[in-house]
Amino acid sequence: MGFSNSEKKSSSLKPTNSNSVSREELREFDLNNQLAKLALPLAQAWKDNHPNAQPATDEDLDDCVLAVAIEMAVAGEAVGGPMGALIAAGGGVAAAGVACRRVL
């Protein structure tokens, strides 16, 4: 039994070095995950206040993201430090998007 072209290509792939991800990248990834966890209750509260929100509509998703991102920005300003900087740099909007997609 011969290998298909995709099997030949995948068998010639070299494993990546696990040290190729920097500490800073891992830290930022962890902070982004923490932001998404913090945004989840805010998104759920928005959904609870908008029971007719439709998961498939961009308008409802956009409204949720905007509301959650605003709350994240307020919290980020209050907290300051690395988390506040990450929120100000767009992490709050990204976290809001993840959280709103989860609850809708």
Image: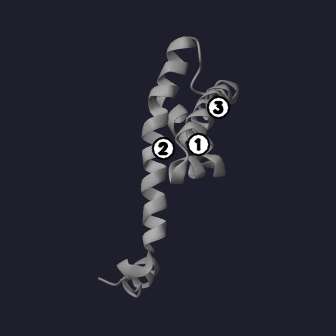
Give the Cα separation between the discs numbered 3 and 1: 8 Å
The residue that label 1 is drawn on is 92
Give the Cα separation between the discs numbered 2 and 3: 13 Å
Q: Characterize the local packing of mark 2: few (<14), some (14-19) or many (20 or more) Cα atoms within 10 angstroms.
A: many
Return the x and y of residue 11 as percentages of the image width and height: 37, 84
The structure's colour scheme is: one colour
The residue that label 3 is drawn on is 70
| Residue lying at 52% horizontally and 41% vertically, measured from the top left | 79
The type of residue carrying mark 2 is: Leu
Question: Which numbered disc, 3 or 1, marks the residue that appears first in the sequence?
Answer: 3
Q: Quadrant of residue 12?
A: bottom left
Between 101 and 75, which is closer to the camera in this rendering?
A: 75
Return the x and y of residue 40 as percentages of the image width and height: 46, 32
Relative height, residue 51 to residue 33 (above, below): above
Q: Is residue 68 visible?
A: yes
- 2 and 1 marks in contact (CB < 8 Å): yes
Return the x and y of residue 86 as percentages of the image width and height: 57, 52
Q: Is residue 104 visible?
A: no
Q: Characterize the local packing of mark 1: few (<14), some (14-19) or many (20 or more) Cα atoms within 10 angstroms.
A: many
